[in-house]
Image (cartoon, coloured by chain):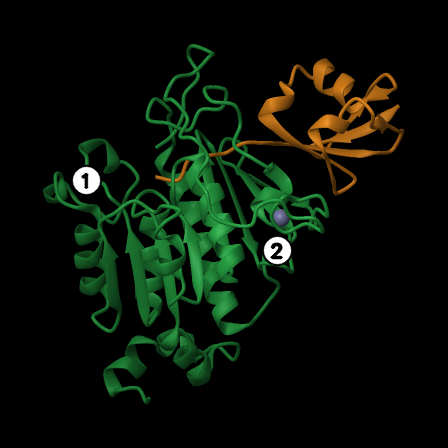
Amino acid sequence: MQVTINGKSEDLQAGNVMEVLKHKEVDPHMVAVELNTQIVERDQLEATQVKDGDKLEFLFFMGGGR
Amino acid sequence: MSFTEDQITRYSRHILLPEVGGKGQKKISQAKVFVVGAGGLGSPVALYLAAAGIGTIGLIDSDVVDMSNLQRQVLHHTPDVGRSKVLSAKAKIQAINPDVKVETHEARFTAENALELITPYDIVIDGVDNFPAKFLINDACYFADKPLVHGGILRFEGRVFSIIPKKSACYRCIFKEPPPPGLVPSCQEAGIIGVVAGIIGTIQATEALKIILGIGQPLTDRILDFDAQKTAFREIKTKRNPKCKLCGDNPEITKLFEHEQEVCQLRTPGTVGVT
Ligand SMILES: [Zn+2]
């Protein structure tokens, strides 16, 4: 399936959000995940299926400021 | 209130703009902006807001200027090393523009003092360097109903977005709570390319001015991420999260509290955090 991750189109095997995170080697604790502009709750990462044409955003924490 | 001749000259390039004009400049001169943190982000924010003629700038920071701050915290100069950051900041703001009233608090921003501090102000700017403080500022602005301009920086990257409480997505709508301690760098071992603080901070100041003037499209419900290595901005559309523990449909957070401060230790060697 064709999925857009952080603005880049990628060809991935079908799966849930957690599987996509694992495939991209992203620790789920390090990001907030948005699927088609909707935040995916952390306990719903496995239950949420990613479909062809979906747009995923992995928002990494950015804590600095000083 | 009317402007003196000097003030008309000083603000002439603003007044020339149809979107600002004399009326808008008056709004700016009457506005009160509270800046949490007089460091990397707080520096450009305070300098540009001072130059713009903001009526009152409130500043809170408990630190003194360190030599390692000077690479990016442009409010502070070499002779300021060892001096209170808020006092150093006040001197620079008043040198740029004596019209600006500066209220300084040499203190930490805490769950106890947060609401009292921000209540007299119109807008709050996040210029802090740690997650507990970022969540505290977000929550305090929600309870006090103050627009907040969030900013965050890390290494070569930065993030900025505005929050109009109860109307647009808040920090907690997206990030819920701080990451587990030690996982995400945010402390002093981190690196930051100094200019990124300038880029994100000046966008924060821009947002504050737009909110004051009521012009343009505020940076709400969209997160702006900047990557200095690519010189690229990316906009991530978002919206209020009905499950948000703060501003959602069934809020669990009903009063201010502080998340535990993360320990300045990273799991992955070689990676760095930011202060
Ligand atoms: Zn929220």
Q: Is residue B146 visible?
A: no
Residue B186: horizontal and vertical position, in percent? 42, 29
**Outermost bottom residue:** B2
Q: Residues within 10 Å of mark 1 (few under 14, many from 20)?
A: many
Instruction: Name the chain under label 2.
Output: B
The amino acid beneath tag 2 is Thr
* Colour in which the image shows chain B: green
Q: Position of residue B52 (x, y in %)?
A: 35, 68
Question: In the figure, B128 relative to A20: above or below?
Answer: below
Vertical relation: A35 (above or below) B179: below
Which residue occupies 41% across, 21% down? B272
Task: Tell me residue B243's x, y (percent).
Answer: 71, 43
**Quadrant (top left/top right/bottom left/bottom right) for the C terminus of chain A:** top left
User: How many marks on residues?
Assistant: 2
Q: Which of the chains bears the disc numbered 1?
A: B
Kind of residue at disc 1? Val
* Disc 2 Cβ-to-ligand 1 distance below 8 Å: no
Q: Which quarter of the rendering shows the N terminus of chain A?
A: top right
Q: Residue at x 42, y 54 (%)?
A: B125
B36 to the left or right of B241:
left
Rendered view: B71 above or below B47: above
Give how far apart the Cα atoms at labels 1 and 2 are: 33 Å
Say which chain is orange: A
Residue receiving disc 2: B220
Q: Position of residue B221 (x, y in %)?
A: 65, 52
Q: Is residue B23 above or below residue B47?
A: below
Q: Residue at x 55, y 54 (%)?
A: B162
Q: Which mark is residue B65?
A: 1
Please report the residue visible at 39 percent of the width from the left and 81 percent of the height from the top: B26
